[in-house]
Image: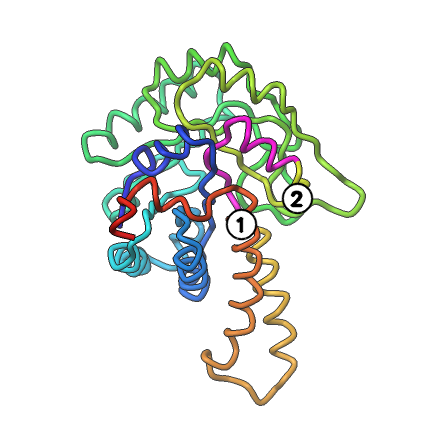
Amino acid sequence: MLLNMKDLLKPANEHYFAVPAFNIGTGQILNGVMDTCEKLKAPVILAIHPFELEFQGDSFIKMCIDRANRSYLPVCIHLDHSDWGPITRAIQAGFTSVMIDASHLPFEENIAITKEVCDLAHPLGVSVEGELGTIGTTEGDTEGGTDSILYTKPEDAVQFVKETGVDTLAIAIGTSHGLYPAGLQPELKQDLLSEIKSKVSIPLVLHGGSGNKDSEIAEAVKRGINKINISSDIKDAFYQRLRVTLEDKKLREPFELYPDSVKAMSEVVEHKVKLFNDDDKLQYYIPNEMI
């Protein structure tokens, strides 16, 4: 069941759970994520970064659309951190949601470009995510974080949402993209999140949540985060296991190489779904008698 982000996150915003946005760079990751979320009756966002879109090509999106349409789950296909070029391509390819990340620009320019994307996407039924404040970065990050975190100001969030018409808002409360190095432990500004949530009615998004303590993430969900991006955690589990499998030099068939990696990744997917309180939330989209 293919939805845009606005419709997918409406129940999450009303009932205080978060839908995971898993970055799916390959078909194996796509199927592992979908199989696990179907088992858990958990709505899911299939996030694809512009680099992943360029690598896989538009035909991969058709595979994602087909998998979503064949599933009883609510599914959104979302373009992660992007600018104008990939956004127009993504809309043409069939994405139901796009993110315009102009957070590195001055505030008024961020508003202007985000509004332009909304004006393009909304008449086509495509939802738009904006970002206000900046997300930190760690070594190996390819998602466009910055060296320092600029925290989202609540009063700016109110103005940004009002002037852009954006459907969801990624806020900066202390996370960084990628896996944190040993010895670095981030800390979320939970009170800041609560203040923003009290002033902004649209769903709020947390980027760069891979390295935070589970207790912090669970608290952020309770306080009103409705979408959490997960990329590094699932890919690290997948490829760490694949490196072990590849030690057997006789293996060469994909159906021999990937199952253990999918299983390792799926364990992380299940953990995140339950941590975000997303399991068994199909009930908010489909009448109980139909489940």
Looking at this view, name the residue that lies furthest to the front: 289
Percent x, y of residue 215: 66, 38
For residue 218, the mark is: none
Percent x, y of residue 18: 47, 38
Crowdedness of circle 2 by 10 Å Cα count: few (<14), some, many (20+)? many
Residue at 46 percent of width and 48 percent of height? 279
For marks 1 and 2 on the same chain, the one whose residue lies earlier in the sequence:
2
Q: Which residue is mark 1?
A: 231
- Nearest the viewer among 121 and 286 is 286
Determine whether, in the image, residue 19 is placed left or right of residue 219.
left
Q: Which residue is mark 2?
A: 211
Residue at 41 percent of width and 34 percent of height? 12
- Nearest the viewer among 221 and 255 is 221
Relative to 184, residue 279 above or below: below
Q: How much space separates mark 1 and mark 2, taking CA atoms?
A: 11 Å
- Nearest the viewer among 203 and 79 is 203
